[in-house]
Structures are given as structure tokens and as C-alpha cells.
Amino acid sequence: MEKPSDLQVVRDREPPRKGWVEPIVALLMALTTVGTAWCSYQSAAWTRQSNRLMNEFNALERRAGLLSVQGMQQATIHTAMFMEVLAAKQAGNEQLVNFYVERFPPDVRKAYDAWLAQKPFENPSADPHPFVPNLYEPRGTREAADAIAKAAISQQEARTAGSVSGQYLANTVLFATVLFFASASGKFEQRRVRSVAFAFAAAVFAFAVVRTAMLPL
């Protein structure tokens, strides 16, 4: 019987050819690289938006706090002026009463006149003072409430943007997994192992692409 030549023996020991793997793996890795770059860009963009919205939230919170403090300070001054009016009226000094009343700001004067219309010195059911909510509103109250409402919206949008940024960042991890297994699939000698590694890389790639497509830009 004829013995096989040394060249034939070497050929028999060669691993199966991997010609079909390399071009597909190269294409998969190229697409994965593009996907990684895109997700990194989107993650950074959403992070910037989240930071901008948080800065806007902080600014609105500070504005609301400032307006509230200023309103309380002005209400304190107005209350002190009203107490002086009562003291002067109790003393029967109408000149001093008029002195203070004429210097009331328009909103306080309106509340004071409405309070006097209730005949508070004769009517026991009248409001105890002009600074009740239905007669007087501290300055900046509405502006502060509007700023607080806008701040809440900015905070919610910032959290949403941060969540989207995190999901894009998670997708970069998936694409990194694809790169690892796609690269490794071309180095295994056994065809079954190569196929399993490549199939896993392709499945993770498809999953990452679907996740990326579902995220807002």
C-alpha cells in the first residue's frame, strides 16, 4: 500500500479554512465600531443636556427662594406700618394715621381699604387684618410659584436626559462585547467554537442596534 507523502500529512493536519469568517467578522467589527462611536457621542450629548437642565433647575430654585425671602421681608415692613396705623388710631392721632396710610404701597393700600370696608372695628366677623390671603398677596408670590413649577419641569427633564445618557453608555458596553467575541471568533481553531462565538457576537450586535434605535436622539 502506498504511504501518504509528508505534504499530504501536513495538509491533513491543517485546521479548517476560515475564509468565510474573516470578511464577515471584519464587517461586523466595522459596524460595531461605528455603533460604539455613535452611542458615545449620544451619551455625551445627553449628559451635556442633563447638566444644562440641572443648572437651569438650580437657577430657578435660587430665584424662587430669593423672591420668597424678598416677599417675606416686604410683608414684614408692611405689617409694621399697619401696626403703627393701629397704634395711631388707638391714640386718636388721625394725622399720623393718614401719614402712614398715604405711604402704603398700592397693593397694601388696596388691601387696607378693602379691610376697612368690612368695618373691622364694628363687625366681629370681619377679617382680623388686611394681610389675609383674600385681601393681600406678598410680592413675588406668583413669580416664585412659577419659578418653582419651571424648576420641577427642568429637574424631571434633567433626570430623563441622564437616564437616556446612561442607556447609550450601556450600549457602548454591549458593542465592546461584540468586538471582543467577533475578534475572538476568528482565532479559534475549532469550527464549532468559531461559529458559537460569531453567533453570540452577531446576536449581541443585533440587540444593541435595536436598543440604540429605540432611544431618542
Image (cartoon, grey):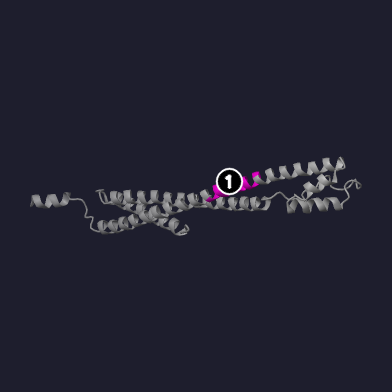
Tell me where residue 44 appears, x and y as whole percent: 42, 52
Residue 102 visible in the shown view:
yes
Considering every residue shown, the one lying at the far right of the view is 122
| Residue type at tag 1 | Arg
Residue in front for this viewpoint, 100 or 81: 100
Q: Is residue 203 found left or right of 76 in the rendered image?
A: left
Q: Main secondary structure of the magenta part?
A: helix
Label 1 element class:
helix
- Badge 1 is on which residue? 62
Q: Is residue 58 magenta?
A: yes
Residue 134 visible in the shown view:
no
Q: Is residue 70 found left or right of 166 in the rendered image?
A: right
- Numbered disc total: 1
Judge the density around disc 1: few (<14), some (14-19), many (≥20) Cα neighbours within 10 Å.
some
Tell me where residue 120 appears, x and y as whole percent: 87, 47
Residue in front for this viewpoint, 171 or 75: 75
Span highlighted in magenta in the image: 56-69
Q: Is residue 111 found left or right of 183 in the rendered image?
A: right
Which residue is found at the position 67% from the left and 53% from the top?
Answer: 142
Which residue is found at the position 14% from the left and 52% from the top?
Answer: 11
Tell me where residue 69 appears, x and y as whole percent: 65, 44
Residue in front for this viewpoint, 47 or 64: 64
Q: Is residue 123 magenta?
A: no
Tell me where residue 135 appears, x and y as whole percent: 78, 51
